Amino acid sequence: MTDMTEQMKKNFEEIKERIDEHKDDFEAIQNSVSQLSDKLKDAKEGWESARAEKGDKNEIAKDEETHQTH
């Protein structure tokens, strides 16, 4: 029974060591994903602003056109 417990502890330690070896890789990937997410958010906000501005210009043009025809 003790041999099995010792083997389980040894296996656990080996797994833990492998995880620790790759921890930096996971953190780097997480940072990259976070940066990409921020860039996508900024691009979306820029697109929305441009669409809103374009919509405002269209409304102003329509208002001016309507005003001129009346």
Image: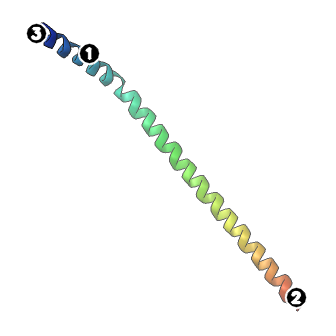
Quick one: which residue is furthest to the left in this view? 2
Residue at image mark 2: 68
Q: Give the quarter of the image for residue 30.
A: top left
Name the residue at 51% across, 46% down: 37
| Amino acid type of the residue that numbered disc 2 sits on in the rendered structure | Gln
Name the residue at 76% across, 79% down: 60
Q: CA distance from mark 3 to mark 1?
A: 20 Å
Name the residue at 90% across, 88% down: 69
| Amino acid type of the residue that numbered disc 1 sits on in the rendered structure | Glu
Taking the image as shown, residue 45 lies to the left or right of residue 22, namely right
Residue at image mark 1: 14
Q: Position of residue 3 (x, y in %)?
A: 13, 7
Quick one: which residue is furthest to the top in this view? 3
Taking the image as shown, residue 1 lies to the left or right of residue 56, namely left
Q: CA distance from mark 3 to mark 2?
A: 95 Å
Q: Is there CB contact under 8 Å for labels 3 and 2?
A: no
Q: CA distance from mark 1 to mark 2?
A: 80 Å
